[in-house]
Amino acid sequence: MANKFGLNYGFINAFGDIAIPLEYDYCSPFSDGLARVKKNNIGYINEDNSQIIPIKYDFLGDFVNGLMPVNNGKKGGYYINKELEVIIAPQFDIVYTFIDGIAKVKLDGKIGFIDTKGNLVIPLIYNYSFQQSDGLIGVRITNEIGFIDYNNNEIIPFEYDFAMSNIFSNGFVALSKLDKSFILDKKGNTIATLKYSVQSKVSSGLVKVELEGKVGFCDMAGELVIPTDYDDAQDCHNDMIAIKKNDQWGYINSKGEEIIAPKYDDVKPFLEKDVAPVLLNKKVGVINKEGELVVPLVYDSFCFKNYSEGLLVVCK
């Protein structure tokens, strides 16, 4: 048995061809030319399916900037390179993957950030942090949310109480305070005050909003440009928005025009190759923007998150 679900994982390319055989218990997307795989134990392979780091470890993180986080209990978090040499010695309780040359670390319940040499560039003073984006980090002190830059300068004051949309996109973020929602720019200026509850990050100039259990989209002026007619929706990607209506998923464009009628049990966003994974009758395939199947409905699960270096993780 490949894993507890009896599934085998591997990689396909954009045409549906098997690029790496479905022989693993689990695969993560490729990063820096390597993918983490599990076959009883964990290791790393390259795009030729050669083992670069032997499959013999209990836990390994993702390589970014040539460094991989390894966590091994209290003050047991450290980083290694592709030669398995320790580059940043154990000193934190939990260490995370590098983004933009800095990485979140946690010690005694507090969060800070280090550079690739292991120096603290943001002190260990925060209770929580959101994903980094556009050179800013959403962080929380007690119950207040604000944004800092990579030098720990406060850019958006700590006065927001909710961040459904907690990352910047194209220089904008949607936040909530005292039951009101706002779109802010990177300097903390209020661009729009919304009449609706924010449900997503700003994406392609649109933000998903909710009214009386239905969702639609507002533009950057806070005007409703796609009516709240849908049961659910995903963010806009490549001018395509996945929408759910009457328990089925389809796609509209950023103008609200129907492109692919709702007929799928589940879908994912359109990716870098202008294709999207879809689920129908418990089988997964991939469609293009015309709604044509480019990978047949033969796979068993949404085991792939996204394209990574031209390959998708699939299982069967």
Image (tube, grey):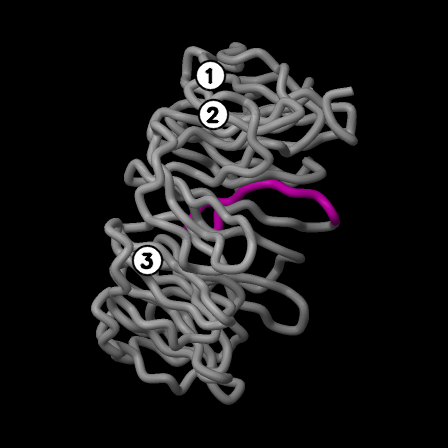
Q: Position of residue 29 (x, y in %)?
A: 48, 31
Does residue 39 lie above or below 100 as drawn?
A: above
In the picture, which quadrant includes the N terminus?
Answer: top right
The residue that label 1 is drawn on is: 51
State if disc 3 and disc 1 touch (CB < 8 Å): no
Q: Are marks 2 and 1 in contact (CB under 8 Å)?
A: yes
Q: Which residue is mark 2?
A: 44
Numbered mark located on residue 133 in the image: 3
Residue placed at 33% from the left, 62% from the top?
Answer: 113
SS of the residue at dot 3? strand
Q: Residue at x 36, y 73 (%)?
A: 183
Instruction: From the viewer's side, name the closer residue of 215 and 18.
Output: 18
Task: Name the secondary structure under disc 2.
Answer: strand
Q: Residue at x 50, y 29 (%)?
A: 36
Q: Which residues are magenta?
A: 247-257
Which of the two marks, 1 or 3, is nearer to us in this view?
A: 1
- The earlier-in-sequence mark between 2 and 1 is 2
Of the numbered discs in the image, which one, if any, rests on residue 99?
A: none
Q: At label 1, which amino acid type do we have?
A: Gln
